[in-house]
Image: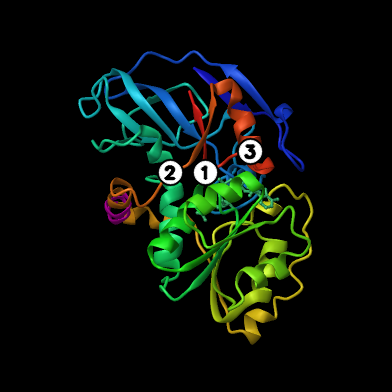
Amino acid sequence: SQQIHLVSRPTGIPTQANFAQVDVTLPDLNDGEVLIKNTWMSVDPYMRPRMIDRKSYIAPFNLNEVMEAGAIGEVIESRNDDFPVGSKVSHISGWRTLHISDGSDLTLLPNVPLPDQLFLSTMGMTGLTAWAGLTKVISLKETDTVFVSAASGAVGSVVCQIAKLKGCKVIASVGSDEKAQMVEALGVDAVINYKTVANLTEALEQAAPQGIDVYFENVGGDHLEAALNVMNDYGRIPVCGMISGYNNDTAQPGPSNLFYINSKKLTMQGFIVIDYFDQFPEFIEQMGAWISEGKIKSEETVYHGIENAVDAFLGLFEGKNKGKMLVKL
Ligand code: NDP
């Protein structure tokens, strides 16, 4: 099995030198085990904080071991009747081409006419994050004006579309004109290219003269500061992530205007998608219907081969993806 190991803890922006591709010979299967050939893997921003050795909601990656990532694979050898040869499964043992499992970590892909990799994106973890953030963490109302950062990404692009389906006005922030076109095609009402505007607060005020009621927080830093400036009273901020700080080695100054949480009576609520895994059936039913009705589109950017998986991961921090960043193995 070709595996990607974390060989040193990054400081600042990770580089190729923090990773190594290692050829590992796997043992023969025991009774109850299956051999899986991975076909797709996911790279995600949360992997960067997992490279730091500290206590968090999930254990850090160990040095000189293969990392974890959401993956889809096909059973190519089986000594487990629940997963015969040819079964398609999802699991979290990505960053490797082959995986041996006793079945306890495997979920069979539902038999639906959708591309397999959607179970790593819109029908998987990032779709669930968008859906849970809008419908469970806050309850979105059709009268809400919603501001979404990293709006062309895996989570953001689904947030934009769900909010439009609910009837909201949606303002998107993205890092390029090409991404602006993409989110406009998804139906958002206004787009800000944060890399070209002189002042993010002014750009947001122009896009939302009536103020914003919901800020779906993916980025942090200047985006949070601008959102706080433009929030209406009783605004809600589901805090999904703050990618702009993931490569910072030292603590950065917070927004200067946090007092607005008090004076505007705002609610900020952090959440982690793991806590919503038990709602997967409800999510799959809703999202599957939206996708089959053509109401939600799945954007993706695909890198090919395990040897390019690190580049795909690093690309997340350079904005190289539109929609879900995926690796086809
Ligand atoms: P994306 O597909 O959105 O990819 C990351 C994008 O972030 C890039 O394409 C880039 O787009 C943008 N970005 C990168 N660096 C910066 C920066 N310094 N400032 C502003 N934008 C930046 O990734 P995901 O959809 O997987 O994740 C989006 C957010 O959601 C992250 O914060 C992630 O940690 C969080 N998340 C949280 C989960 C949870 O359980 N709470 C689960 C999944 C994701 P651009 O070109 O527009 O800059």
Is residue 318 found left or right of 126 in the rendered image?
right
Question: CB of residue at label 2: within 8 Å of ligand 1?
Answer: no
Tag 2 secondary structure: loop
Could you tell whether 282 is left or right of 20 in the image?
left
Q: Is residue 105 magenta?
A: no
Q: Give the amino acid type for the residue marked by disc 2 in the picture.
A: Ser
Answer few, some or many: residues within 10 Å of disc 1's Cα (few below 14, many 20 plus, some between 14 and 19): many
Cβ of mark 3 under 8 Å from ligand 1: the answer is: yes
SS label for mark 1: loop
Report if the beta carbon of the residue with label 1 is closer than 8 angstroms to ligand 1: yes
Q: Is 129 above or below relative to 205?
A: above
Q: Quadrant of residue 60?
A: top right
For residue 298, which numbered disc appears in the image?
2
Viewer can see residue 174: yes
Q: Position of residue 106 (x, y in %)?
A: 33, 35
- Tell me if residue 201 comes above or below residue 29 in the rendering: below
**Disc 2 to disc 3, C-alpha distance:** 17 Å
- Neighbor class of circle 3 (other Cα within 10 Å; few <14, some 14-19, many 20+) is some
Q: Amino acid at mark 1?
A: Gly
* Residue marked by disc 1: 323
Residue in the foreground of this view, choosing between 196 and 304: 196
Residue 66, x across and y down, in percent: 55, 28
For marks 2 and 1 on the same chain, the one whose residue lies earlier in the sequence: 2
